[in-house]
Amino acid sequence: MKSLYQTAVYVGVSVPITLSLALGLATLLNQGLRLRPFYRLAYFLPYITPVVAISMVWQWIYNWRYGLLNYFLSFFGIHEVNWLEDHHYALFAVIIMNIWRFVGYQAIIFLAGMQGIDRVYYDAAKVDGASGFKAWFHITLPLLTPQIFFVFIISLIGSFKIFEEIFILFSGTPGPLSSAMTIVYYIFDQGFQRFHYGRAAAASVVLFGIIFALTLFQMVVTQRWVHYER
């Protein structure tokens, strides 16, 4: 139950924040900024970089004595935070790292969708006197719902499968007091470390049931809100 709860917290926090930041980032990139190809490459690099390399770099960033994150926080008067050894912050350390990792990938998908929207809609909105925000809210957002729907599904399912980042970030442990143990890590721990194969198999069925139920819910309910350009 603890692993299910922590997985739910991870999914409930990381998925909406990543989706929102990616949408805002894609909107900025769609404004015709200079060096836009460079920005697209820079934001996409974390997604294609191996998880091992990313996790090891973030181990250094999170170091409570000489890490880069605490160094920047010190400018705001925040004392050193023991990100990887304090059970209050361990799960949020994983969330921050994965938001940074996936936000660029999702932004590229949103940017591709925005660039595929016909400019006729924006020209008509400008003639009608619509502001930039109204045009974005009433044109870009509805016509981007196919991409939002796709990204939401893959990010939601992918978040339930998180394992490698936790294993590497906390050096083969689920964090202090198992504070970063997710359902997949629980399956690994029960099956390959404690050799409770029956319990690991049962937890795998539970995970499958959760992902299957969420996928059905999204396909039946959420897809009704998707608008396809004609």
Image (cartoon, helix red, strand yellow):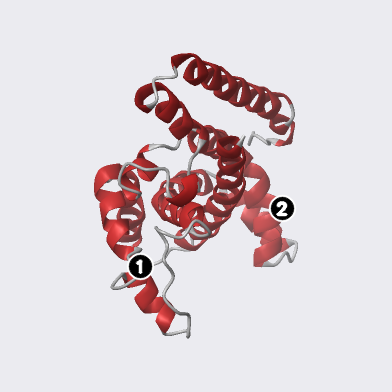
How many numbered discs?
A: 2
Instruction: Name the residue that disc number 2 marks.
Output: 138
Location of residue 71 in the rendering, given as x and y in whole percent from the top left corner? 35, 77
Location of residue 27 in the rendering, given as x and y in whole percent from the top left corner? 53, 58
In the displayed structure, does residue 186 sit left or right of residue 164?
right
Q: Quadrant of residue 33?
A: bottom left
Q: Disc 1 marks which amino acid?
A: Arg
Instruction: Name the residue that disc number 1 marks.
Output: 34
Secondary structure beneath disc 1? Answer: loop
Is residue 115 shown to the viewer in this render?
no
Q: Quadrant of residue 148?
A: top right
Using the image, tell me which numbered label, if any, was put on residue 103. Answer: none
* Frontmost residue, 111 versus 181: 181
10 Å neighbourhood of mark 2: few (<14), some, or many (≥20)?
some
Q: Disc 2 marks which amino acid?
A: His
Q: Label 1 to label 2, Cα distance in Å? A: 27 Å
Q: Earlier in the sequence, mark 1 or mark 2?
A: 1
Secondary structure beneath disc 2? Answer: helix
Please report the residue visible at 71 percent of the width from the left and 53 percent of the height from the top: 138
Quadrant of the image containing the C terminus: top right
